[in-house]
Amino acid sequence: MRIGALELNEPLPELREPYALTILRPWIDVNNVGTLLLNGLETQFGAKELGRLANPGNFFDFTRYRPMLYLEEGIRKVNIPNTTFSYAKREGENDLLFLHLLEPHSLSEIYVDSVLRLLRTFKVKKYILLGSMYDAVPHTRPLIVNGGAIGGETELDLKKSGAQQSRYQGPTTITILISQRAPQFGIETIWFIVSLPQYVHVEEDFLGKVRLMEVLNRLYHIPFDKKDFERAGEQLRLTNQKVEKTPELKELLPQLETLYEVRIKGKEGDIGPKLSPEMEEILWKIIGKDFGEA
């Protein structure tokens, strides 16, 4: 079945006031936090494939999102990058849609409109965008989550979550129009972006995943995978070891912690504190040395 630019599997499932859990690559998927989280939830809930873009080449530049060759039982196959959707039903709770969005390079308005039509087709109650970005934060403190909301219920959710109200201004993604336009169709929107230390680069950031899962568990009764706590603990242990071997970072860390405390205590509407030029120079030198994976 076609809905805009999307090809959906039939018959379409009947979902109960679903929440659309959404990630966006690569813009806000630093250290693959969103991908890790959504893949884990799909496995946990036994999600079923719902659909994808019918012609992804209309929207994506495949010299930037490279197709991948792989072997399956000795036969060479090609995996073409695409935006994909799946769903899962929950007993006694809102059902779930999982949206793996790739940022489009062209025909963006059609892309956005197609996703909005999908949300309307399944009468989505809340559109929840999840992601991660690098920030001037220390690994020794609870990770900051920034967020925003449009809608009565989601604004209450934002307050309950403990996330800081985002005051970001600057370049963004065209897919932000999904969050902006969905409320016109009775779909409330909310977004949570976890801040990750700029000096830690990992393929799978379990500290970031656990932090976002805390929010989802508190608001939407989505259970944890206990193994993630063990993986997050191991990541923290390895990061501490790396810091001990990096004198420049050991010197910088107390200043990042001070900056963190000022930021946490800041009042609504305040302009957030920034690193001094000297601190920025030290931090970028550390990053340039490839501080490495935890």
Image (cartoon, rainbow, N blue to C red):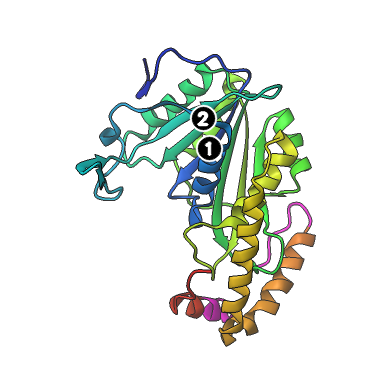
214 sits to left or right of 278: right
> Is residue 53 positioned above or below 207 on the image?
above
208 sits to left or right of 218: left
17, 79: nearer the viewer: 79
Q: Is residue 167 visible?
A: no
Q: Quadrant of residue 229?
A: bottom right
Mark 2–mark 1 CB contact (< 8 Å): yes
- x and y, in percent, of residue 91 in the image: 67, 22
Q: Residue at x 67, y 73 (%)?
A: 256
> Is residue 9 positioned above or below 131 on the image?
above
Q: Specify the label residue 240 is tagged with.
A: none
Q: CA distance from mark 2 to mark 1?
A: 6 Å
Q: Residue furthest left?
A: 75
> Is residue 77 positioned above or below 182 on the image?
below
Q: From which residue to which does the magenta span run?
A: 267-283
| Residue 281 inside the magenta-drawn segment | yes
- x and y, in percent, of residue 210 in the image: 64, 52
281, 53: nearer the viewer: 53
Q: Residue furthest front?
A: 73
Q: Residue at x 52, y 32 (%)?
A: 98
Q: Is residue 205 visible?
A: yes
- Give, as a three-letter code, the residue at label 1: Thr
Q: Disc 2 marks which residue?
A: 47
- x and y, in percent, of residue 3 in the image: 39, 18
Q: Disc 1 marks which residue?
A: 43
Where, quadrant-wise, is the N terminus in this rendering?
Answer: top left
60, 179: nearer the viewer: 60
What is the secondary structure assignment of the residue under circle 2? Answer: loop
